[in-house]
Amino acid sequence: MQFIIQRMADPATEAGELPTDELLTAMAEYNRALADAGVFVDGMGLKPSSAGARVHFADGVPVVTDGPFAETRELVAGFTVIETDSREEALAWARRWPALDGDGQVKLELRQVFELEDFQSGPGVDAHAALGERLRRQPTEISPRLAFSGDCREAFEYYADALGGHIEAMVTHGETPAADNVPRDWQDRIIHARLRVGRWILQGGDMTAECYQRPRGFSVQIDMDDPARAEDAFGRLADGGEITMPIAETFWARRFGMLVDRFGIPWIINCNKPETEGGDPA
């Protein structure tokens, strides 16, 4: 069963005072203990109510009221979600909350989370169960993995510059436990590269001649919200490559173009028209 340990607000949290490094360390140790016991699910702190709002419904009509709100002691400043076998176990963890918090005067509230099994079977419960199952099928991440014939390092360094990203990983064959099984002239080739561009991930690696196949049947599409940015990205990626469709305005996009870069990777650069102009609302 899951429980939420609500850390109630106080004048300090409502004033936006940040926790000291000492308190952050104590909270990290507390969360680590939860994780080591296998009961930690999630947890985070909330900004003061001055940064929030309330939405009241009057006869079905939403009315928004901006913070801050006066009743400080009734507000929530943060929460930790845990999963335990009993209410008593959850309370035991709540009692272990760091005493440094709130100068020892912190107020916590323990609330149990409803499970679908708590409700009577019916279409509503079935709908929630179906949604839960759908979310469980979703992977943590979906990202293209590109194959190269030996120039993965050069390609990813180029992509990082062209797209304003940063390389998170660049592992050579020689750095892996399988290094002895790789030819000497292949030791410095890349077995795994990972590039982050904002929230998006691009991965890749080098493949030996007998395994490598030139990419086909797909394109890596990137979307820009500004025509000038789309043209800049197109120009950078097309440098030394082959333009298969010059970037231009189309009936659905302010800019759209297709190319194969110097490393043999096909790209689509798209800049949708606003929905009001008849573009794709997605």
Image (spheres, rainbow, N blue to C red):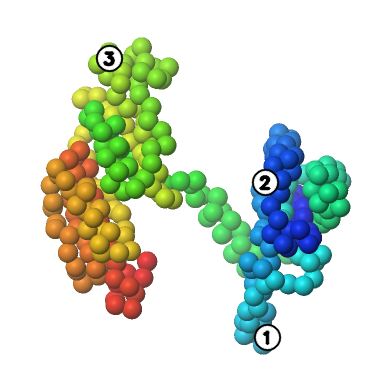
Residue that appears at 69% across and 59% down:
16
Which element is circle 2 on? Answer: strand
Image-quadrant location for residue 247: bottom left
- What amino acid is found at the position of numbered circle 2 in the picture? Val
CA neighbours of label 2 inside 10 A, class few (<14), some (14 to 19), many (20+) = some
The residue beneath circle 1 is 58
How many C-alpha atoms fall within 10 Å of the one at disc 3: few (<14), some, or many (≥20)?
A: few
Nearer-N-terminus badge (1/3): 1
User: How far apart in space, not on screen, are marks 2 and 1 (Cα)?
Assistant: 35 Å
Q: Quadrant of residue 51?
A: bottom right
* Secondary structure under the numbered disc 3 in the rendered image: loop
Residue displayed at 16% across by 46% down? 239
> Label 1: few (<14), some or many (≥20) within 10 Å?
few
Taking 60 as reference, is 34 above or below it? above
In three-dimensional space, the C-alpha distance between marks 1 and 3, rounded to whole angstroms, equals: 73 Å
**Image location (x, y in percent) of residue 273:** 29, 71
85 left or right, relative to 191 = right
Instruction: Depth check: give the residue in front, 141 or 109.
Output: 109
Q: Mark 2 or 1 closer to N-term? A: 2
Residue 101 placed where, x, y %? 79, 48
Secondary structure beneath dot 1 equals strand
